[in-house]
């Protein structure tokens, strides 16, 4: 974290570039929160866009092997995933209750991240988290719940908005609670 224009995004992008240059195996899924964007689960919207692109460009057999049973519910939260042929062709299962659909979608994303992390080192990067949403943080915390998948999560945010951002407050609370046991947290002021 750091002030506006301090170079947080550049630092993170350079780190990720160096990581890819050193080892081509890491799978980097990145996204960004925008101040005036109003999309559901925007904390992970760009990450899931990156995931969708990756899955569209993998051989279908590999993609099908990675997908959890209830991936179709995840596509209800993130319609971009319907661009992945294996997801579009996934068997439909009916759940009428919105809360159950949400729980099934959250579980599907967690299972998918676990599956990805078993095949390649996984890095999630979210820029400008101060503009994130609470639903997106809830989904992120579900992905990270114990036992967390082996992944590196990098988030950046503007320090001056750290105390007023509901998304950052919820993330901090989650990481200080039950999640803190399975997550190594490092804060880097820029």
Image (spheres, helix red, strand yellow):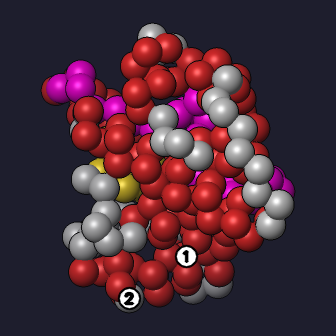
Element type where label 2 sits in the image: loop
Residue 138 lies, in percent from the top left, at 58, 71
In space, the residues marked 1 and 2 are separated at their CA atoms by 14 Å
User: Residue at the location (49% across, 14% down)?
Assistant: 60
User: Residue at the location (55% across, 83% down)?
Assistant: 169
Q: Is residue 121 above or below residue 34?
A: above
In the picture of the structure, the residue carrying the numbered disc 2 is 177
Q: Where on the picture, by quarter, is residue 98?
A: bottom right
Of all residues shown, which one is farthest toward the left?
A: 22
Q: Nearer the viewer, residue 101 or 168?
A: 101
Range of residues picked out in magenta: 23-52
User: Residue at the location (59% across, 46% down)?
Assistant: 70
Q: Is residue 31 magenta?
A: yes
Q: Is residue 174 left or right of residue 83?
A: left
Mark 1 or mark 2: name the one nearer the start of the chain: 1
In the picture of the structure, the residue carrying the numbered disc 1 is 168
Is any atom of residue 8 visible in this view? no
């Amino acid at each position: 974290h750091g002030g506006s224009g301090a170079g947080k995004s550049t630092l993170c992008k350079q780190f990720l570039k160096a990581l890819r240059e050193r080892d081509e195996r890491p799978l980097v899924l990145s996204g960004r929160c925008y101040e005036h964007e109003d999309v559901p689960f925007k904390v992970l919207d760009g990450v899931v866009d990156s995931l969708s692109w990756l899955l569209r460009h993998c051989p279908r057999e590999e993609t099908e092997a990675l997908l959890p049973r209830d991936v179709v519910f995840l596509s209800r939260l993130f319609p971009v995933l319907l661009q992945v042929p294996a997801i579009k062709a996934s068997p439909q299962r009916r759940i009428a209750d919105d809360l159950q659909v949400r729980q099934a979608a959250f579980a599907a994303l967690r299972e998918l991240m676990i599956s990805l992390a078993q095949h390649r080192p996984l890095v999630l990067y979210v820029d400008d988290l101060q503009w994130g949403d609470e639903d997106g943080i809830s989904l992120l915390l579900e992905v990270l719940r114990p036992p967390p998948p082996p992944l590196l999560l990098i988030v950046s945010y503007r320090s001056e908005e750290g105390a007023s951002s509901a998304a950052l407050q919820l993330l901090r609370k989650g990481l200080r609670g039950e999640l803190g046991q399975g997550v190594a947290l490092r804060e880097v002021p820029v």
